Amino acid sequence: MNEFAGQILREKKLDLESGLTLLATIGNSAPFIGLFGTVWGIMHALQALGGVEQISMDMIAGPVAEALVATAVGLMAAIPAVIGYNFLLRKLRRLNALIDGNAVRIVNHWGRGG
């Protein structure tokens, strides 16, 4: 009986944790996507300067602004995802501890003859 209850608990915990994978992925990958956008924007700015004899601030400002927006968007996606992930993970750990405690009580109660 103990082993059966333990298996059910492990399966339910895996079900609950499966939703956190998306948040973890967003939180981990969004800054890198923003960084890629930054690099792309800077490369675009440098390419625009390649064949020009006289450099003006207008030629650099547009692509650099786009690069900074890409960075900001990446951070705006990553920060809430990481906060949400940490919040939900903490709640899930507390819920798992409560479930484990209740499962032990139930198994002990049934083991004594109910």
Image: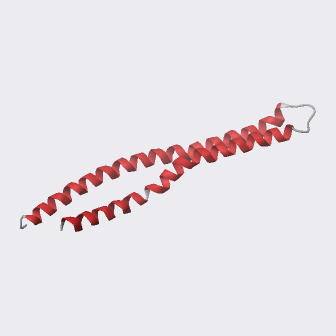
Q: Is residue 2 left or right of residue 35?
A: left
Residue at image point 42% right, 60% down: 18
* Res 11 quadrant in image: bottom left
Q: Is residue 1 above or below residue 17?
A: below
Q: Nearer the viewer, residue 57 or 18?
A: 18
Q: State the quadrant of the C terminus.
A: bottom left
Q: Nearer the viewer, residue 4 or 106?
A: 4
Q: Is residue 51 left or right of residue 2?
A: right
Farthest residue to the right: give it.
Answer: 53
Q: Is residue 12 left or right of residue 114?
A: right
Farthest residue to the left: give it.
Answer: 113
Q: State the quadrant of the N terminus.
A: bottom left
- What is the tally of numbered marks visible in this picture? 0
Q: How is the image coloured?
A: secondary structure
Q: Is residue 85 above or below residue 18?
A: above
Residue at image point 58% right, 48% down: 30
Measuring from the top left, give residue 37's x and y in whole percent. 68, 45
Measuring from the top left, give residue 14's x and y in whole percent. 37, 61
Measuring from the top left, give residue 89's x and y in whole percent. 38, 49
* Res 45 quadrant in image: top right
Residue at image point 32% right, 50% down: 93
Residue at image point 67% right, 45% down: 36
Q: Is residue 52 left or right of residue 80?
A: right
Measuring from the top left, give residue 70's x and y in whole percent. 66, 44
* Res 20 quadrant in image: bottom left
Q: Is residue 54 above or below residue 109?
A: above
